[in-house]
Image (cartoon, rainbow, N blue to C red):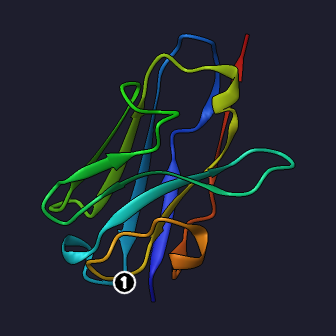
Amino acid sequence: QVQLVESGGGSVQAGGSLRLSCAASGYTYWYSCMAWFRQAAGKQREWVSSISSFGGATYADSVKDRFTISRDNAKNTLYLQMNSLKPEDTAMYYCATRGGGLCPARSSDVNYWGQGTQVTVSS
């Protein structure tokens, strides 16, 4: 059974940093592309970043140069380092995967979701 468990969310002031983690189990993690999505109140869930099995990373324009996605295949863990946070980054952040090598680009591509971790950035 696939399990994705996020942690590391919290409340910070604008300009601050947070590091999210996602512990994965129940499938072949090292082979799978992993992604972060987020959903702000009243808005649709949006893709933030993806990282392939070999470490190739892509980012949404809104977070490029501020967020860094990484993975530790030995620990089956995904990370998202978020720097220079802005109030518009406030959202529930979700770890996600299709469960295979292809990277999800939209919510409909995702087969497995974590429960989410809340990030709140105050001005």
Residue visible at 52% across and 47% down? Answer: 7
The total of numbered circles placed on residues is 1
Residue visible at 26% across and 64% down? Answer: 76
Quadrant placement of the N terminus: bottom left
Task: Please state if 99 lies on the left or on the right of 109 as rendered.
Answer: left
Q: Is residue 120 above or below residue 108?
A: above
Extreme residue in the bottom direction: 1
Residue visible at 48% across and 66% down? Answer: 96
Quadrant placement of the C terminus: top right
Q: Position of residue 108 (x, y in %)?
A: 59, 77
Q: Position of residue 50 (x, y in %)?
A: 36, 56
Callout 1: helix, strand or loop? loop
Query: Tag 1: residue type?
Result: Gly
Task: Please state if 115 lies on the left or on the right of 82 as rendered.
Answer: right
Q: Is residue 22 above or below residue 15?
A: below
What residue sits right under mark 1 in the picture?
Answer: 26
Choose top left, top right, bottom left or bottom right for residue 98.
Answer: bottom left
Extreme residue in the front direction: 61
Q: Position of residue 26 (x, y in %)?
A: 36, 83
Task: Please state if 17 lies on the left or on the right of 102 as rendered.
Answer: right
How packed mark 1 is, by other alpha carbons closer than 10 Å (few <14, some 14-19, many 20 or more), is few
Question: Which residue is nearer to you in this view: 103 or 21?
Answer: 103
Task: Please state if 14 lies on the left or on the right of 31 as rendered.
Answer: right
Choose top left, top right, bottom left or bottom right for residue 113.
Answer: bottom right
Question: Which residue is nearer to you in this view: 27 or 65?
Answer: 65
